[in-house]
Structure formats: structure tokens, C-alpha cells
Amino acid sequence: MLQHEETEKIREHYNADPQREWDRLKVRHPYEKYITTHMMDRYIIREDRILDIGGGPGHYSIHYARLEHAVTLLDLSDENVRFAKKKARQYGVKIRALQGNAMDLSEIEDNSFDIVFLMGPLYHLMSEKSRICAIREAIRVLKPGGYLFCSFILMFGGVIYGLRELQDTILLPKEQELFDVAAQDKSLSFEAFTYAYMTTVRDAKALMAGFPDLKTETVFGQESILSPYKNVLSKSPKRIRQAWYDYAIRFCEKEEYLTHTEHLMIVSSKIK
């Protein structure tokens, strides 16, 4: 399928229900945002200008706008952009929200942001060439000394999801490729909830290591060890959930626990 057709299918998927994507971090996976922002705050300092590429309905953009950062959100989905603007008004903050493609940031000047988020595009770009293009564009608009935050969906995250939410998928012939590839510790581009690329920890690290103007600062699981236990945690009292969220932070960077997560983040600095 042509890349243009893939792009339109992905846009249609996210245009269909921005509220659902908002609720993913607000209701279904709050620990992902909690752990991710905790780790980001190691690097983001007061008055940093932030570009949120693939920012979806605006969770992270609005979070940092509320902390008085100047934030620009860019997303493929027109409806996500509209939704993010609406949510920003509800929270009483200002963000600049634009519709656009992660592979073409030509309207944005070189070296213009202190912080760049690339949290979404890399798990919808089906070819290595496309992923490299998006990362190069993110690097171009990032200031020297700034930080790039890249998210990936892990291949084993699909196994975690199946075991936790859709246990009968292990018996479905059409799902066997995913399970087989995960068992072989390989990455895969395929059509799932929409066009998706799922990677191994090894391949994600190798991709980022291929950019000589980036230095990897840390690699961590955005859900840490909590992904398999989402349904158990959701039934626990808030005080207990919070204690587990804080405990999970202690594991999120440990190499041996990275496959317990569904989303992997690699934090890189742009070499001056």
C-alpha cells in the first residue's frame, strides 16, 4: 500500500474518536503519564519551549502548558488538533496546535525548540526510511543541547495486551504472526488497530544510535512494571495505586524489566 494511503487510514483512525485517546491516559492508563512526566522532568526546565509532534488530543502539551511552558502541538489528525484546542481552553492554558505530518516540519525553523516530543509517530511509520525521516526532522528543529523524547510500542507489549485483555487471541490463526515474531524477538510493521510498527528494545536502541548528533541519556518503560497489572490496579484504592506507581518508577530504567512495558521511551540530547 502506498504511504499516502497508510497516512490517510491513520488519520481516519484518530479522527474517529479523540475522546477515547484522551481517556486512554486519563482513565485507562494514568500510570503511563505519571511515570513518563516524572522521567521527563529530569530534563525539562522552566521556560523551555516544547514541540509535541504527534501530540494527539493534547495530554502532554496541556500538562506542560499548565507549568507555564510555551508549547506547540502538531498532529496528523484534524480532530485531535481541534480537541486539544478545546481541552486547552477548558484547562485555562494556551497552546499552539497545528495539523501536520511528522516527516515534514518545513514550516518550523531549525534549532527553534528546547524540547521535542516524538511520542506517537514512530509507532505508525511503517518503514525504517520514514522513521529516520521523522527523527531527522525532530533533530533539525531541536536546539543544540536540547532533549528529544521518542516513544515506541514494544513487540512484547502486544503479548502483554493479549494476555491481559484478549486472551483468546492466542488461539486465532490470524494473530499467530504477531505471537511468533514476538517469540523470535523481532520487530514488525503490520495492520492492527491501525497501521502499526512494533519494535524490540534492541531495534529501538539501534535506530536512535544511528544519529551521530544525538546522545542517548536514558531508556525507560513508560508503564514500567505495571502494564500486566492494569486491571488489578484499577480495582485498588487510590492510595494503594499511587504507592505502586511510585514504586514502579524504581524499575522503569532497569534493562531487565524493559519488556514488562508496552511503551518504551528513549531520551536523547542533541550534541552541541
Image: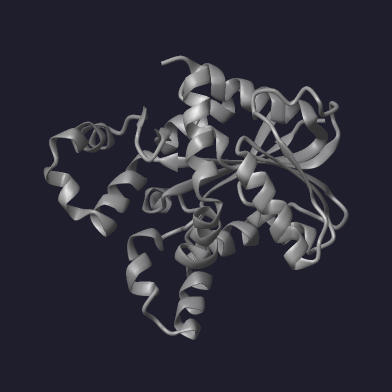
**Image position of 46 (left or right of 231):** right
> Considering only vertical position in the picture, is 227 above or below 126?
below
| Quadrant containing the N terminus in the rendered view | top left
> Whole-percent x and y of residue 58?
66, 53
Camera sees residue 221: yes
> Whole-percent x and y of residue 155?
35, 39
Q: Residue at x 18, y 34 (%)?
A: 174
How many numbered discs, if any? 0
**Image position of 268 (left or right of 145):** left
Q: Residue at x 45, y 82 (%)?
A: 240
**Image position of 226 (left or right of 171):** right
Pick whichever, 224 or 8, lies toward us: 8
> Whole-percent x and y of residue 138?
70, 30
Q: Residue at x 58, y 30 (%)?
A: 208
Q: Residue at x 81, y 61 (%)?
A: 93
**Image position of 107 (left or right of 63):** right
Pick whichever, 23 or 198, lies toward us: 23
Camera sees residue 128: no
Image quadrant assignment for residue 183:
top left
> Considering only vertical position in the picture, is 231 above or below 8?
below
Q: How is the image coloured?
A: one colour
| Quadrant containing the C terminus in the rendered view | top right
